[in-house]
Amino acid sequence: MNLILWRHAEAEDLPSAMSLSRNADLQRVLTPRGHKQAEATAKWLRNHLPAPYRVVCSPAVRARETAAALCSDAEVLDVLGLGASVTEVLATVGWPGTDDAATQTVVVVGHQPWLGRVASRVLAGREMPWSVRKSGVWWLTGRTRDSDAQVALRAVIHPDFL
């Protein structure tokens, strides 16, 4: 299974008076720079993703706008919201998959800190506060070699390098 973790692109800051409002935070939109980041990352993904692939994203506007740069039919899932748990995220995408899911690809568009925690759980076996940069991608592949389950880190991409 291919698990692609994609952090939303740069979004507008909240005015300080609204900084404590969870609903206002969900409504933040991408900046012009954020749209460019999302487009650059989406272009790279389109050139490398195997078909078919599934795109799931947080209900936050900035995550939906980021996912829309890649496809128009991303699944918006409440479980991928701002305070998502690593266990729920991995269960939702079906990680690590089954033997018949060897060619399955899921792109998850979400937020820090849970994206970094998902990456650390999958790669290192425990949750750690790893950082995924805005519009950054971590591409992880689960596979079986000689009856052993393995995880391969296929790519870590930052939009400034695209």
Image (cartoon, helix red, strand yellow):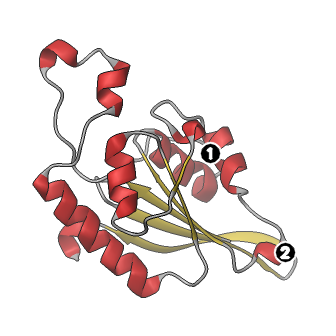
Q: Which residue is labeled 1 in the image?
A: 89
Q: Position of residue 33 (x, y in %)?
A: 13, 57
In this rendering, is residue 21 above or below 65?
Answer: above
- Residue drawn at (68%, 48%), measured in percent from left and top? 92
Residue 88 location, quadrant: top right
Residue 95 location, quadrant: bottom right
Q: What residue type is labelled 2?
A: Asp
Count of marks overlaid on the render: 2
Q: Position of residue 29 (x, y in %)?
A: 24, 43
The reply, left or right, for residue 106 in relation to residue 99 is left
102 vs 147, nearest the viewer: 102
Q: Where is residue 75 in the image (x, y as percent from the top left)?
A: 55, 54
Quadrant of the image for the C terminus?
A: bottom left
Q: Where is residue 98 in the image (x, y as percent from the top left)?
A: 83, 68
- Residue drawn at (43%, 65%), measured in percent from left and top? 72
Q: Which amino acid does label 1 sit on?
A: Val
In this rendering, is residue 145 above or below 33?
Answer: below
Q: Which mark is residue 99?
A: 2
- Residue drawn at (50%, 81%), measured in percent from left and top? 49
The reply, left or right, for residue 88 in relation to residue 59 is right
